[in-house]
Amino acid sequence: MSDHVLVINAGSSSLKYSLIHAGSGEAAADGLIERIGESESHQKHRGPDGETESSDPIASHEDALRAALDAFEKHGPSLDDLELAAVGHRVVHGGSKFSAPVLIDDALVAEVTELVPLAPLHNPANLEGIKVARRLFPDLPQVAVFDTAFHQTLPPHAYTYAVPAEWLEEHGIRRYGFHGTSHSFVAEQAAQRLNRELADVNLIVLHLGNGCSASAVQGGRSVETSMGMTPLEGLVMGTRSGDLDPAIHGHLARELGWSIDEIDKALNAKSGLKGLAGENDFRELSRRRDAGDEKAQLAFDVYCHRIKKYVGAYYAVLGTVDAIVFTAGVGQHSADVRSAALQGLERLGIRLDPVRNADPAEDGVVSTGDSDVAVLVIPTNEEWEIARQAVALVDQREE
């Protein structure tokens, strides 16, 4: 059987897809369809013929997936020739029900539908992608891989909020964590770089992109993470506030007359770096800092200070730390963030090498040779992790 998996990530008005070899991680093709349902949609497909783009109206997710299949047929590679092993779906919220990938059937769809109140911005789109793919690939195994699954190993004292107990029991209000596929993938890669077994290392993983999250990984198990019931909690992000006093919600409602939806939108889409500096593209923020822009500098300082706080907190949670791992767009590409976030932590055995940090080598090590705690830069690959988990589950079913 082929080890190729079509990985689908359906957003509210977008469809991202990748054709991944589960063994090697090689992407034979990938693409993105944006502005679904608008007068002019945009499609990009990258395959053996290079990159192609088009702008035509695409009315629905089903039309989007059909457009993606047309792109495979026209520009390659042929899905028929590869004999797909499965379709893997990114599903944002699995609640407390799912700690591993799951074969998709009607019962699974019903359970994910029940979780929509926990992720009203994400799960409905993920479900639409699942329903469309099941119609177009009726004979292929479909696998759901949950962003929250890796963090289901959090102990009760880490996932429980200090709120009335019935809020958890009746409404599922607790910490779930997100970016789980990224944290899982990067943790395993870090252990390999250290020439250690994953079960024998303690890691602090920092996923820093437009969305940001930190995790404390003890022997391959997530024991603490920064995102909470939703992806809003924790680190400062591109457009999300991260941690803030929950009484601010009431204050805004009383003083400005804002509705819950208005407050929610402001904290999710108009805060973070964008709220502080009017810009959530970190490259542009860096250019403005270099030009002496005070708002950009403050946004950078707030961003890095929050990371440093979480590094210290998670060091305390773990007791001993073997490595700190930076990943995702900002974590991988911003030497300034890595330097500012770890500055002054030498007494904790964390020593950054400025030369290595400026230009990480292939092994990803950016700490000094005498640093007690290794500092690594490792690219994440969530699509590969989804493909690996999907094939492993399908193979297990067939044994």
Image (cartoon, grey):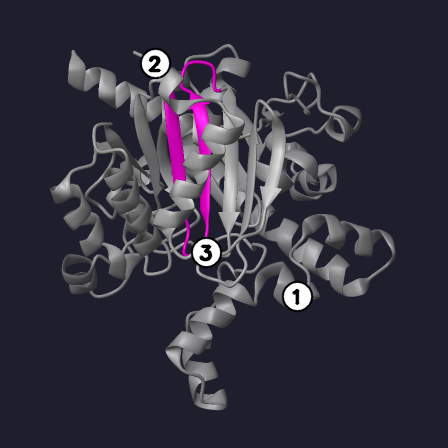
Q: Is residue 208 left or right of residue 101?
A: right
- Vertical order, 187 against 178 (above or below): above
Mark 2–mark 1 Cα distance, whole angstroms, equals 48 Å
Q: Which residue is mark 2?
A: 2
* Outermost residue to the front: 74
Residue 215 appears at what percent x and percent y? 44, 39
Queried whether the magenta region covers residue 19, the answer comes back as yes
User: Do the numbered discs 3 and 1 sit on residues whose CB atoms are within 8 Å?
Assistant: no
Number of numbered discs overlaid on the protein picture: 3
Q: Looking at the magenta stretch, what is its main secondary structure? A: strand
Mark 3–mark 1 Cα distance, whole angstroms, equals 30 Å
Q: Nearer the viewer, residue 143 or 206?
A: 143
Q: Helix, strand, or loop for circle 1?
A: helix
- Vertical order, 122 against 311 (above or below): below
Q: Quadrant of residue 363?
A: top right
Q: Is residue 107 visible?
A: yes
The residue under the point 68% across, 60% down is 279
Q: Which residue is mark 3?
A: 36
User: Quarter of the image containing the C terminus?
Assistant: top left
Q: Is residue 7 left or right of residue 50?
A: left
The residue under the point 51% across, 27% down is 29
Q: Which residue is mark 1?
A: 276
Q: Which residues are magenta?
A: 4-25
Q: Helix, strand, or loop for circle 2?
A: loop
